[in-house]
Amino acid sequence: MTGPLQGIRIVELAGLGPTPFAGGLLADLGADVVRVDRQPKPGQAGDPSVRFDFYNRNKRSVAFDLKQAGDKETVLALVGKADVLMEGFRPGVTERLGLGPDACMAVNPRLVYGRMTGWGQQGPMAMEAGHDINYLALTGALYCMGAASAPPPPPLNLVADLGGGGMYLALGVLAAVLSARTTGKGQVLDVAMVDGVAHLMSMFQAFRQEGTWTDQRGDNIVDGGAHFYGTYQARDGHYIALGAIEPQFYAALLSVMGLDAAGVPPQNDRATWPAMRERFTTIFRTRTRQEWVDAAAGRDACLSPVLSIDEAWEHPHMVQRKTFTRFDGLLHPSPAPRLSATPGSLRRGTPQPGQHQQEVLSDWGIGD
């Protein structure tokens, strides 16, 4: 096993979304993540589709019926040898299973107990169901997305589930593990997606209070309002993306487009943004996507092609950096971030439930 987190043991109670994502991130970086799956029914065949569950690569799996006293005791024995436990159930579920923070920290006072929810462990909505879009809606983030002429669009669940949820869980776990190694005491992490997304929105909350961000979608510098920050359709129907915020990059973009800087309004004159967007729209439809990419290459114009997933796999920059790795018969995103001395690695594909039962119990020194 390799990576900077080698030697850290994590018990992950099986779930969906941000918790397995965080566990997978830590596993990529070398942590020994043991996923506690539900016990398969007798005679139940393995599911071949689990190999597509990239969040659970590099993990090992044990399987138990947590409603059975003997199985619960075995899981508590694993917890006693672990640095971290992570769960993503609604508040109170693990307590009812006998695996809540009090029970677990009684057998392991230095345990870091990571709890991942959408709404948090307390609050009027703590027990309500929800998904990424619901958490975005409550934080003000969703309101800021999309065109003013249409309802806010459902974004991919990168923002709340993975950004505001899984990444904050991983960060909190690492911070608490460092603290436990210094103090000898563990702690409970209340990781809520609404908290994480609100924190991610810090810059826009500050802009709003400063008066430089209006309360209307598609009217601001990075929400599609500015003509120099957005997407445009090329002649071949493909799209290009612009991010020429700084004046030197905007000047380079104008040059690529064949525009004289002296003949256009000042870049940050908001009153002229709608007209300039129309002008940009007309100009970008005169060339194909690749022609625009070629024209902008090496000129710091902040112009990029909008690629499909399939195209991203084959882009020369992604190929040269090995951003994707062929592993277990599939193309995986490579471990990130990259560390020079102790890099993460792809070591094993997603396991079947219970695949490593005896191996884990033996490795962790737990008897039959």
Image (tube, grey):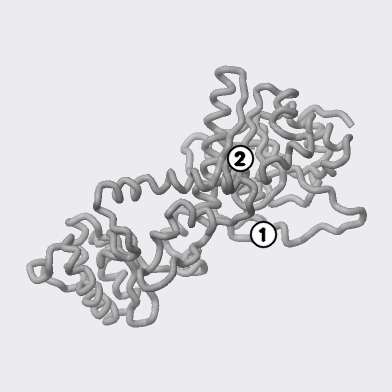
Instruction: Name the image quarter holding the N terminus.
Output: top right
Instruction: Name the image quarter holding the C terminus.
Output: top right
Quarter holding residue 52:
bottom right
Q: 120 or 46: nearer the eye?
A: 120
230 sits left or right of 21 in the view: left
Residue at the disc numbered 1: 52
Q: Residue furthest right?
A: 42
345 sits left or right of 104 in the view: left
* Amino acid type indicated by mark 2: Gln
Q: Position of residue 359 (x, y in %)?
A: 80, 37
Rendered view: 157 above or below 193: below
Q: Residue at horizontal 77%, vertical 52%?
A: 352
* Any part of residue 131 in sight: yes
Q: Residue at horizontal 44%, vertical 64%?
A: 315
Q: Residue furthest front?
A: 124
Dot 1: element: helix
Tell me the tag on residue 121.
2
